[in-house]
Image (cartoon, helix red, strand yellow):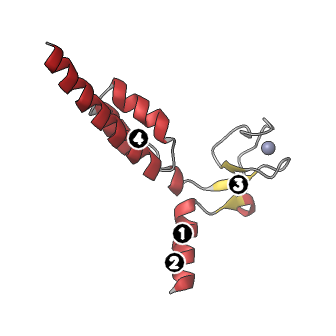
C-alpha cells in the first residue's frame, strides 16, 4: 500500500511538471498548471494542452498605467481601470506575432 502511494505520488508529480510546462509554453502560469496536474494527473495535462494559448491572444495597453493587458480583459490587472474592448488601432500584436516579426526581421 505504501509502495503504491509512493508510485502514485511520483506519477502525480511527473504529470504536474508536465502540465506546468505545457501551461508555461502557452503563456500561462507554470505553478497554476502544476497544481492542476498534481490534483488531476493526466486530466490536468489535457486541460493545459487545450487551454487558451495566451501567446496567440492580441493585447492592448492600459490607457491609465500603460501596462500591457490582454485584449479580452475587462479590467487592468495592475490599476483595476475598467477597459472597453479595444478598437483596431489600440490592439497590439500577440506574443507569437511579435516573435514571427522578429524572426522575419532577422532573416
Ligand atoms: Zn492599468
Front residue of 53/45: it is: 45
Pointer 4 or 2: first along the chain: 4
Calculate the distance from the C-alpha at mark 3 to the C-alpha at mark 4. 26 Å
| Cβ at disc 1 under 8 Å from ligand 1 | no
Structural distance between the alpha carbons of marks 1 and 2: 6 Å
Residue 50 in sight: no
Front of the two marks 1 and 3? 1
Q: Position of residue 80 (x, y in %)?
A: 78, 35
- Lower sequence index among marks 1 and 3: 3
Question: N-terminal of the two: label 2 or label 3?
Answer: 3
Q: As drawn, is 49 to the left or to the right of 98? A: left
Mark carried by residue 99:
1
Mark 2 — residue?
103
Q: CA distance from mark 4 to mark 2?
A: 26 Å
Say whether marks 1 and 4 touch (CB < 8 Å). Answer: no
Judged by depth in the image, the label closer to the viewer, 3 or 4, is 4
Q: Of the numbered discs in the image, which one, if any, rests on residue 60?
A: 3
User: Dots 1 and 2: beta carbons under 8 Å?
Assistant: yes
Ligand 1 closer than 8 Å to label 3 CB: no
Label 3: state its secondary structure.
strand
**Image coords of residue 32 (percent x, y):** 48, 34
Q: Report x, y in % for residue 19.
A: 36, 40
Label of residue 20 in the image: 4
Q: Kindly identify which numbered label has been placed on residue 53.
A: none
Give the SS element for disc 2.
Answer: helix
The residue shown at (54%, 84%) is 106
Choose between 95 and 11: the one closer to the eye. 11
Amino acid at each position: 500500500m505504501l509502495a503504491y502511494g509512493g508510485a502514485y505520488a511520483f506519477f502525480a508529480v511527473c504529470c504536474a511538471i508536465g502540465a506546468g510546462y505545457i501551461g508555461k509554453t502557452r503563456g500561462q502560469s507554470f505553478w497554476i498548471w502544476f497544481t492542476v496536474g498534481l490534483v488531476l494527473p493526466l486530466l490536468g495535462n489535457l486541460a493545459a494542452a487545450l487551454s487558451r494559448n495566451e501567446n496567440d491572444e492580441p493585447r492592448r495597453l492600459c490607457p491609465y498605467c500603460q501596462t500591457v493587458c490582454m485584449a479580452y480583459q475587462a479590467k487592468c490587472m495592475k490599476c483595476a481601470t475598467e477597459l472597453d474592448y479595444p478598437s483596431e488601432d489600440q490592439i497590439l500584436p500577440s506574443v507569437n506575432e511579435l516573435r514571427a516579426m522578429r524572426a522575419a526581421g532577422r532573416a
